Image: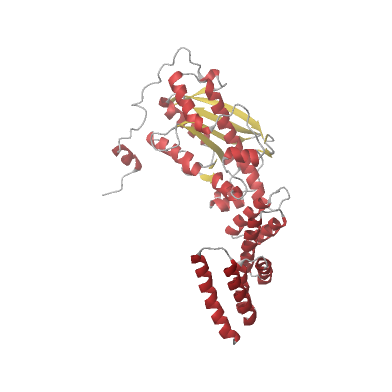
Amino acid sequence: MPARSLAEKLKSLGVKFGTSDLLPPQPKPKTSVPIEEVVDGRYIATPQGDTFVYENHYPLDYHHGIVPLCPPAPLHTLAQWANDMRLANLPLEAFAFLDTETSGLAGGTGTYAFMVGVGRFEGETFRLVQFFMRDPSEEAALLEALADFLAPCKALVTFNGKAFDAPLLAARYTLHATPSPFADFAHLDLLPLARRRWRDRLPSRALKYLEENVLNASRTVEEVPGYEIPYLYFDYLRSGDATPLKGVFYHNAMDVVALAAMLNHTSHMLADPLHESIEHGLDRIALAKLFEDLGKWDEAARLYERGLEQQLPETDFWQAVKRLSLLQRRRGDLSEAARLWEKAAAEGHVYAHIELAKYYEHRLRDHAAALEWTRKAMERVGELDIPRYEYDHWIAELEYRRKRLEGKAGK
């Protein structure tokens, strides 16, 4: 039996396509305040009907906190990290910065995006457009207008967009039997990178928290918490009063602007990771780990060294020493690795004793010294307050090494 298409599977589940079965917009109470009286937007005519849009323009030198929106540094390292080298070669005008406000966070066919904020660089400005549907029956028109706006673009920049925004919008296009306008786009999701960059220093990697603590940008009293937004929209659908939605437009706009500023900040940090503006040692170490994972070992080694010169919590300091020592071994700089192992061994780190035993046995052929480091490791394990299974593991490995070295050393 041939595989069924997604559309066929959705139909078999009872999902209806298009807008023919949707009820027309219901009249609002006479006391309602329409959206055009809350934000100074306009209506766009599409083949699917009208949709409401609100538009802002920001000059390229606009600063979101301490970070300008433009220009970002070359994106080669970012593209390598994202495993999509198309990102390195696209002009800035090809990037669309996108964020949605939805009827819920559960996903699935019952969740829709009632507002889509998207920005792109045009000439000397950053143009931010927010598409809003006054009623679920206007969804097809919103999607049509969004597709027109995205037509010149080749890449998406989002924050958790790969897991949420993009799949949600793609599903809504499918439900309306319309091709997704970003199906072939490169996609740069900044959330996974933010987790890599700041998980050791900051307690949260939420976009708003990063705005405040990385970009030094604060929001005004217009801001509404994200968790309230679905309820505010449903209240609007019941009452017709759009007044509370002004804060939702503000929230969404700041999320999109923050995306552009975060791309600028991140691209400069990855393009020049040794720059003196990186004040926190943990940020430098996080960059070292990232460059190491990308196979940029020379840059990673320099970043570890610079990070170790900055102030670090003790645990993070010794973890960085360990990573640098093992990286130096992979790079072939065994003398530098041994220097770091000796430093760590002096502080009682068992792994360093074992690495020195290997170094003296296999590199220097000094079996007596290797045996001495093995015995010191066994003594150190006995002093540690560790679970029994961990103790047994260490001792079994070290006992095997000790017996072998005793034979080689003639003892």
**Front position in the image: 184 or 307:** 307
User: Which residue corresponds to the image point at 52% horizontal and 46% vertical from the top-left?
Assistant: 186
Vertical comparison of 341 with 363: above or below: above
In the picture, measured across the screen, residue 66 lies left or right of residue 247, that is: right
Q: Is residue 182 visible?
A: no
Question: In the rendered view, how is the structure colored?
Answer: secondary structure
In the picture, measured across the screen, residue 204 lies left or right of residue 29, that is: right
Vertical comparison of 228 with 378: above or below: above
Residue 356 locus on image (x, y percent): 63, 73
**Front position in the image: 65 or 403:** 403
Direction right: furthest residue? 276
Label count reads 0
Vertical comparison of 131 with 6: above or below: above
User: Which residue corresponds to the image point at 33% horizontal and 39% vertical from the top-left?
Assistant: 10
Residue 381 locus on image (x, y percent): 57, 69
User: Which residue corresponds to the image point at 49% horizontal and 18% vertical from the top-left?
Assistant: 241
User: On the image, which quarter does residue 371 sit in?
Assistant: bottom right
Direction bottom: furthest residue? 410
Residue 211 locus on image (x, y percent): 62, 38
If the image is split into quadrants, where does the C terminus sit?
A: bottom right
Residue 375 locus on image (x, y percent): 60, 76
Q: Is residue 386 visible?
A: yes
